[in-house]
Image (cartoon, grey):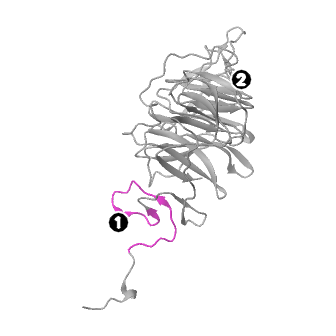
Amino acid sequence: MPRLIQDTLKPLIEFKKFKGIDNLCTDDLRLEPGFVRVANNIDIDSEMMARRRKGVLDKVVNGSAHSLWSDEDRLCFGVINNDLDQINTDWSTSLILASVGPTKMNFLKIGERVFFSNRIVTGYILNGVAYAFPESVRPQRQRMVGGELIEYLNARLYVAQDDTIYRSIAGSPMEMDLENNFIVVGGPITMLMGVGADHLHIHGLYVSGGGKCMYLSNLEPSLEEARYKLILDVPALPGSAVAIERMALGKDVVGRCCVWSTVIGIFMGLPGGKVRDLTSDHYGILDIEEGASLIKWHNGYRQYVFMGQEAAETAWGDIKGILPGPLVNLTSGILEPVFYARAADGLTGSDSHSQTI
């Protein structure tokens, strides 16, 4: 038998840098150098090398939890066993509002208030106390409605409900003019994200509705003159959209952008309707039906993480398959006192997808 000489053996593939996962190429032998099929618990560093992701798994609260949210400073809220709770820094929980239901809750911080809505229950939290939206006493105004998604742009609160987007009076997020402050975009609406660059006086909304993604601009002063720009012919996956604050847009210009996932890839929406395709040549979100997303800092750069469960499974406990009931609002003023404390953020899921920004 001839003796093998090591120098005569040639490697089939050599990794000088890692570019990420490719789940779209149909032939493993045709993968572009730098891409792999599977990478579990891996981060890519500034030198494009794969490193084992650091972290621990620790149970911090008991019960069935979903819709966890944090302001990355001192507040953390979530729905635990169908109750709206605050999670404190010692991992204890304080009840804010009982029996809000299993439907996904959305949170939005405006000043010192944290607005919450799952369409069935809507209100805001201030200094650890939950309040209802007050009834408007001004002519041709009414109390602001709730929705499945909420956003804040140009001093207005926006909510998505079925196929329609409603917004509040400018400077008054808890009241609206029902005759003028709504726009129909087609449902179901799975993304409602505001972007803008104050220095350039550019603001708009990235919206997914009717199976498409679009950009809405020219929203002021009236929605009657709003402009639509079609972005994608596929919808944003529910829960995948998240904002990026203070994104560098050019020389001495920063602004608010957003990132979202679709079955054909991950995209970044910039002010003005310009969209960056981040992954579609090599990666699409093929195994997630809905989930939750966040932007986290890792070694000096921002990382987009989208977490969820496969379509065949039940996501977020019992939340799937439950339709919202009639639209109502909290009817009382002060609902429940709660201990006010600094808290950390948290989200859970069975699978995750990350993209370095």
Q: CA distance from mark 2 to mark 1?
A: 57 Å
Residue furthest to the left in view is 1
Decide: marks 2, 1 in contact (CB < 8 A)?
A: no
Q: Residues within 10 Å of mark 1 (few under 14, many from 20)?
A: few
- Quadrant the N terminus occupies: bottom left
Name the residue beneath numbered marker 1: 29
For numbered disc 1, what is the local secondary structure? helix
Q: Does the magenta-highlighted stretch encompass residue 27?
A: yes
For numbered disc 2, what is the local secondary structure? loop
Q: Is residue 14 above or below residue 56?
A: below
Closer to us: 333 or 284: 333
Q: Which mark is residue 194?
A: none
Q: Going 41% across and 59% down the picture, which residue do you hit?
A: 37
Q: Quadrant of residue 330?
A: top right
Q: Does the magenta-highlighted stretch encompass residue 23?
A: yes
Closer to us: 145 or 89: 89
Q: Is residue 35 above or below residue 228?
A: below
**Residue 180, image x, y percentages:** 62, 16
Q: Quadrant of residue 194?
A: top right
Q: Residues within 10 Å of mark 2 (few under 14, many from 20)?
A: some
**Residue 100, image x, y percentages:** 56, 24
Name the residue beneath numbered marker 2: 170
Q: Amino acid at mark 1?
A: Leu
Range covered by the magenta-colored residues: 12-35
